[in-house]
């Protein structure tokens, strides 16, 4: 493969990457890929013990909740997590339908809903980010522009696609260079969702080709491995700056994924 055409990582001053949602399925793979490529990695998590068990001391851990922006009384955990960071990769998420992940401490008013995490939480990260951030990479979802069509109408029953689109728009309006990745239904481990693909442990075995699109017209399943690869690879290509694209896996993969070629289509 030829050399990347331009790189945030090479041009940025600190080369410290913050991964929000690092303990999730895609997030764990993003961290593994960054570490394999010798990046300095900081992660944002609500659960330090879980993160320490996963990553040991290979990453710097900051504890914070994206639903809790700085207030008069509270320390600015998000601002601190973003201090000195050159790129942010955000793979946070919750379940599209009610589950324990919504945090029903108050039965009638769950806390960690899609509207909160994918909408308000992303706005809080944007507010906390400095204008020096070289890239905000955000994992959104296929279907954000097709909420009136099956199966997205169903998926959006509790507002996950509305919230993802709100999050996307907050990032775009911020002026921070961004890359927004819209995967289809996630397959391949780590299996962290509560859905049929998790039940059946649906896998690609790395054998399916990556297809990108830009108008939210693609349908299908997406390997968590390829979402994580795209999150990290996009940092190396200026063609992905201020781009939004869907990513699905379809057809057999005959050669290794050529990200440069894929990103050049955007
Ligand atoms: N499942 C699908 O089929 C599908 C389809 C399209 C797009 N997506 C999107 O793909 C991304 C990755 O999905 P995944 O299944 O790999 O995710 P996941 O395993 O559900 O992980 C979600 C992560 O978000 C973090 N998180 C949740 N609420 C948070 C909060 N309030 N503050 C800080 N962190 C919070 C969790 O971290 P801690 O618990 O450590 O704090 C966890 O690491 C998500 O954005 C998801 O919406 C999923």
Image (spheres, helix red, strand yellow):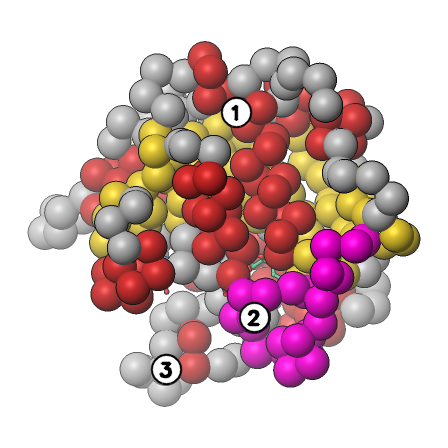
Mark 3: give few (<14), some (14-19) or many (20+) Cα within 10 Å: some
Please tell me which residue is depicted at 62% across the width and 52% down the height of the picture.
225
In the image, taking residue 250 as reference, residue 115 lies left or right, namely left
Decide: marks 1, 3 in contact (CB < 8 A)?
A: no
In the image, taking residue 261 as reference, residue 187 lies left or right, namely left
N-terminal-most mark, 2 or 3? 3
Q: Is residue 50 above or below residue 33?
A: below
Assign a secondary structure to mark 1.
Answer: loop
Residue 68 spot, x, y in % from top left: 27, 55
Whether residue 184 is visible here, answered yes or no, is no
Residue at which label 1 appears:
177
Please tell me which residue is depicted at 75% across the width and 61% down the height of the picture.
204
Q: Is residue 147 above or below residue 59?
A: below
The verdict on label 2 being within 8 Å of ligand 1 is: no
Residue at which label 2 appears:
191
Give the numbered dot on residue 146.
Answer: none
Decide: marks 2, 1 in contact (CB < 8 A)?
A: no
Please tell me which residue is depicted at 54% across the width and 55% down the height of the picture.
26
Residue at which label 3 appears:
104
Which residue, as the protein is rendered here, is positioned at the far right?
251
Residue 230 colored in magenta in the image: no
Q: Is residue 89 above or below residue 207?
A: above
Assign a secondary structure to mark 2.
Answer: loop
Residue 198 colored in magenta in the image: yes
The verdict on label 1 being within 8 Å of ligand 1 is: no
Query: Can you tell which quarter of the image residue 14 is in?
Result: top left
Whether residue 87 is visible here, answered yes or no, is yes
Which SS does the magenta portion mostly show? Answer: loop
Q: Which residues are magenta?
A: 187-208
């Amino acid at each position: 493969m030829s050399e990347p055409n331009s790189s945030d990582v090479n041009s940025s001053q600190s080369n410290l990457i913050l991964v929000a949602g690092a303990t999730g399925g895609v997030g764990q793979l993003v961290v593994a890929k960054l570490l394999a490529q010798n990046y300095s990695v900081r992660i944002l998590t609500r659960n330090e013990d879980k993160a320490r068990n996963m990553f040991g001391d290979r990453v710097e851990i900051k504890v914070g909740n994206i639903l809790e922006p700085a207030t008069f009384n509270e320390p600015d955990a998000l601002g601190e997590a973003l201090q000195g960071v050159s790129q942010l990769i955000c793979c946070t998420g919750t379940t599209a339908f009610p589950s324990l992940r919504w945090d029903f401490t108050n039965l009638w008013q769950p806390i960690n809903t899609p509207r909160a995490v994918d909408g308000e939480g992303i706005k809080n990260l944007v507010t906390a980010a400095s204008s020096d951030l070289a890239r905000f990479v955000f994992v959104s979802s296929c279907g954000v522009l097709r909420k009136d069509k099956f199966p997205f109408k169903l998926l959006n029953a509790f507002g996950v696609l509305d919230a993802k689109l709100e999050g996307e728009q907050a990032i775009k309006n911020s002026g921070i260079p961004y890359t927004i990745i819209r995967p289809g239904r996630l397959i391949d481990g780590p299996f962290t969702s509560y859905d049929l693909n998790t039940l059946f442990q649906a896998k690609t075995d790395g054998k399916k080709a990556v297809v990108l699109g830009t108008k939210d017209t693609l349908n299908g399943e997406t390997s968590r491995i390829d979402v994580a690869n795209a999150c990290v690879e996009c940092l190396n290509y200026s063609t992905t700056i201020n781009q939004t694209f869907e990513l699905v896996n379809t057809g057999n993969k005959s050669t290794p994924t050529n990200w440069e070629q894929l990103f050049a289509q955007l």
